[in-house]
Amino acid sequence: MVAVLDQAFRDEWGRVLASLIGYLGDFELAEEAAQEAFAAAAERWPRDGEPANPRAWLVTTARNRAIDRIRRDRTLAEKTRLLEVPTATEDEMDETTIPDERLELIFTCCHPALALDAQVALTLRTLGGLDTDEIARAFLVPEPTMAKRLVRARRKIKAAGIPFRVPDDHLLPDRLAAVLAVVYLIFNEGYGGRGDLAAEAIRLGRALAELMPDEPEVHALLALMLLNDGRSEARFVDGVAVPLSEQDRALWDHSEMERGRTALRRALALGGRGPYVLQAAIADLHAEDPPDWRQLAALYGELARLTGSSVVELNQAVAVAEAGNVEAALGVVEGLELDRYHYLHATRAELLRRLDRRDEARAAYERALELVHADAERRFLEERLAELS
Amino acid sequence: MKYMLLINHGDAPTPRDPEAWATLSEDEQKAVFADYQAINETPGVTPGLQLQDAGTATTVRVEDGRTLTTDGPFVATKEAIAGYLLFEADDLDAAIELAARIPAARLGGAIEVRPVTGEW
């Protein structure tokens, strides 16, 4: 029964909360009321059985709690004559048609007037239903720090009048990009080792694809996450990072990757050619054996033009080298201004090794080792360096 | 909601500095005036009064009952408020859109958007 409740919590929290914020127009009040309703469910459902429509039960219960609270506050206000409190309306809700307002909610949480770390935390709290201490642990900050961050963000939403709605068409491209960036940031935090965050990001991505079925970049982000996540089991062996070409394909989750490909096809069919479409197409090509390095080099080139990113140019150089032109790739790598980036030196080292310029290769591996932080990658570089000695 | 839009000129050229102002073409200069006029005529906007430049400011503090005055603005001259306007809008998105239309925002200055709570 507890398991059923956990499932209900995960599935319903975002929708229930979004619907309450839409109804009450107040983030903090809605969240408190939702929390009370979920606590009441935890107490009653195991005893009395789960209601026929759990979502309607949760929304109605939370709404009633919120109305009670507004009434109490109004009574207080009448006594003190200081506060103006809106009158609570009590029209009966049609329990079968609770509007899905998660999209309004995610655009509010990812509003550019909030700091990025607040956008991330708020999205995980409100749409993901993660507890404050879970989010704090995921981002390696103390729980009170995370709690403060969330309180401040909710207050700003209310005080500054950040709207609870899907932005108008002329604002939508920028604002959607901000939403997708938050989801992808959550995914990458998880991809670095904390798998629960990656799963959470995929859940958010799936919800977005359902809510915005005509946006190619939304499907493409989902595709990108599924294609990468499908390979996560093979990325490390005994704590050592394994390059894609050497990964054990039997460890890949082929059905998850196929779902990724389906999402990518959808994005392409919608005419998408944005940064996430390109990244997903690249991730898909990388999974082929052997990959089509020429096509990869072309896609990286297109992505580099779109984003102006030197890191993408570095990846393009790798693809050029794999396609057979190691000298040209080295020329590109040596022209990039990424001296603080360990991948630049690791890539340069690998190219020099292939050209049999062993001394220069050794020096480049040593420079990469000075800059690398993650243990798994450090071990990989050390192994390569040892091979050259 | 009511917002106060605080205008910081930063490096934005203004007619008060003729040399900097001359870096704008005649069309750009006309556009600046036209834009400010259009903003002041936008429904919901209460135009602010013009402030003299920050060099004319006097900053007042009271310590131990004594009034202390210093020459100049509270913040660095470059960061001093150059002007303001009030805007009655539905939400922050509308206020951000208006702020983006203020010429100072595109000419090197910045606009701070602050919700107004009411009377003191």
Image (spheres, coloured by chain):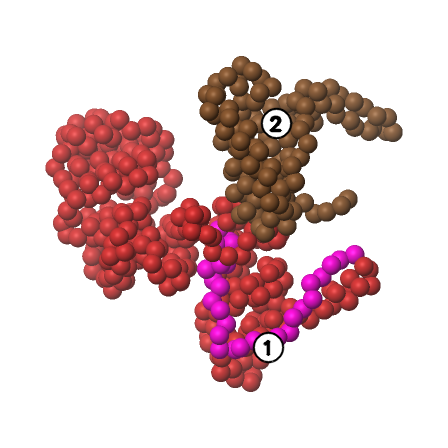
The quadrant holding residue A253 is: bottom left
Q: Secondary structure at mark 2?
A: helix
The quadrant holding residue A205 is: bottom left
Highlighted magenta segment, given as a residue range: A82-110
Label 1 or label 2, whichever lies nearer to me, is: 1
In-image side of A36 versus A287 (left or right): right
| Residue under the image location 38 percent in, 59 percent down | A212
Q: Is residue A104 above or below residue A325?
A: below
Q: Is residue A323 magenta?
A: no
- Say if residue A381 shows up in the picture: no
Outermost residue on the right side: it is B65
In-image side of A227 versus A329 (left or right): right
Q: Is residue A56 above or below residue A185?
A: below
Q: Position of residue A186 (x, y in %)?
A: 42, 52
Q: Nearer the viewer, residue A282 or A100?
A: A100
Q: Secondary structure of the magenta portion, mostly?
A: loop
| Residue under the image location 73 percent in, 19 percent down | B71
The quadrant holding residue B16 is: top right
Q: Is residue A87 magenta?
A: yes
Q: Nearer the viewer, residue A98 or B42?
A: B42
Q: Is residue A389 above or below residue A299?
A: above
- Please report contact status of discs 1 and 2: CB closer than 8 Å, yes or no: no
Q: Position of residue B70 (x, y in %)?
A: 75, 21
- Say if residue B7 shows up in the picture: yes
Please check whether the numbered discs 1 and 2 fall on a single chain: no
- Residue identified by numbered label 2: B79
Chain B in the picture: what colour? Answer: brown
Among the chains pictured, the one given red colouring is A
Which chain contains the residue that carries disc 1?
A
Q: Position of residue A76 (x, y in %)?
A: 78, 64
- Residue identified by numbered label 1: A92
